[in-house]
Every structure is written in structure tokens, then in C-alpha cells.
Amino acid sequence: PDLPTKTHSYVKVDLPKHLKKYMDDLWARYEGTIKEKNLPPFEEFSKIRADLASSRIDSLIELVEEHEEDDIPLVVFSAHLDPLNKLAERDGWKKITGDVSAIERQRIVDEFQAGKLKGVAVSIKAGGVGLTLTRAWKAIFVDLDWVPGANQQAEDRICRIGQESNKVEIVRMVSVLEVRLSLLDWLQFKLR
């Protein structure tokens, strides 16, 4: 009861043509495997997830710039380093990843909480526990971790006791892929 209301929203990002082609090629290669209720190799999933995260960087920077113009402090989470590294290049931003020492993490948190930083870019694994970033009432997830509980823990870095805002907003970036299904495919999908 002491926590603010948490809402979730989504920002749609267009899928680049080269990535769409790659995904189409994967579908062609593994369609039979998937229809047999088996999964493609883990490495393929990992690669496409990393590529999707990287493909969202330009849209992320636009979102961040809009929030900076409105003086809204942000925490940005990603399971991948490319988006975090890009944000760390910006003035007023620092990043927390597994490579950052515990002392430096706390220094970054203290700077952010004191209003000396515009935002913090945080890897979901490294920043999912032990950090209080309640100066932000808004977090952007570029992508998600494999483990749903890790994502929840990351959200809770801003949605915790001490949050002064009466609202917390979690924004998730999603890539838009136009999918054409035959009527038969659609019916099979709906009947599952």
C-alpha cells in the first residue's frame, strides 16, 4: 500500500529491413522445427535478441532526448550492452553493468539521486537488486532479460518505498514486424 501506482506502456519501433530479412530467413530455416513444437538453437535466439536491442538505439536516443527536454530523470534498462554504452556517451549519463565495482555503483546511484545526472543506463542483471533509483519515476526497457523475475526486480529499482512520485511508469520498447498469416495459420493460432 505504500508503493506508487505502476503502469506499463509500450513504444513501437520499426524493424529495420536487414533484420526483417534475417528473421524471414530464420523462419524459412526453422519453420518445420517450430511447427513440431521444437525450438531453434539457443544461439539463434540470443543473436536476434542482441540485434533487436541494437536496432532500437536510434529510437531510444529520441525518447531520451524528449525526456531530457522535459527534465524527467530516467533509468534505462537493457539485457544487452550496446544500448547502454551509447547512453553512457551522453552528457549527464552513466552506466551500471557487471564491470562496474560496487563502490562505483554506489557513487553513480548517489550522483543520480542527488540530481547530478540526467539518467542511468543499467544492465538488468547488474542493476536488478541492491539499487535505489527513486529519483526517477520512469524507466525504459530497451529489451528484456530471459528471466521474468529479473525484469520485475529491475522495475522495482524505481518502484519502492522512498519513491516520492505517486506514479511509476515502465516503458517497454517493442519491434514491429508485419506478419502475414494465411487464414489457416490464423485459425490454428486462435484455436491453441
Image (spheres, rainbow, N blue to C red):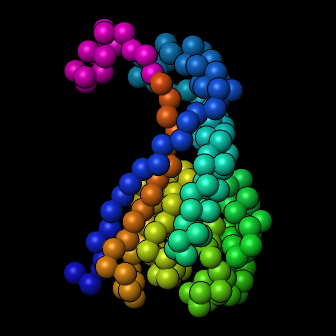
Q: Residue at x 26, y 15 (%)?
A: 187
Q: Can residue 83 be seen in this view?
A: yes
188 in magenta: yes
Q: Is residue 42 visible?
A: no
Query: In the rendered image of this protein, does residue 114 appear above or below residue 185?
Result: below
Query: In the rendered image of this protein, does residue 108 appear above or below residue 149?
Result: below
Q: Which residue is drawn at 49% across and 82% down?
A: 135
**Magenta stretch bounds:** 179-192
Quadrant position of the C terminus in the picture: top left
The residue nearer to you, when weighing 101 against 25, is 25
The residue nearer to you, when weighing 179 against 36, is 179
Q: In this view, does 167 lie to the left or right of 151?
A: left
The picture places residue 141, in percent across and down from the top left corner, at: 52, 57
Q: Which residue is drawn at 68% across and 26% down?
A: 18
Find the residue positioned furthest to the front: 69
Q: Residue at x 22, y 81 (%)?
A: 1
122 in magenta: no
The picture places residue 87, in percent across and down from the top left corner, at: 70, 63
The residue nearer to you, when weighing 29 against 162, is 162
Q: Is the magenta stretch mostly helix, strand or loop?
A: helix
Query: In the rendered image of this protein, does residue 132 appear above or below residue 76?
Result: below
The picture places residue 98, in percent across and down from the top left corner, at: 69, 68
The picture places residue 174, in percent across and down from the top left corner, at: 49, 43
The residue nearer to you, when weighing 97 against 120, is 120
Find the residue positioned furthest to the right: 89
Q: In this view, does 123 lie to the left or right of 3?
A: right
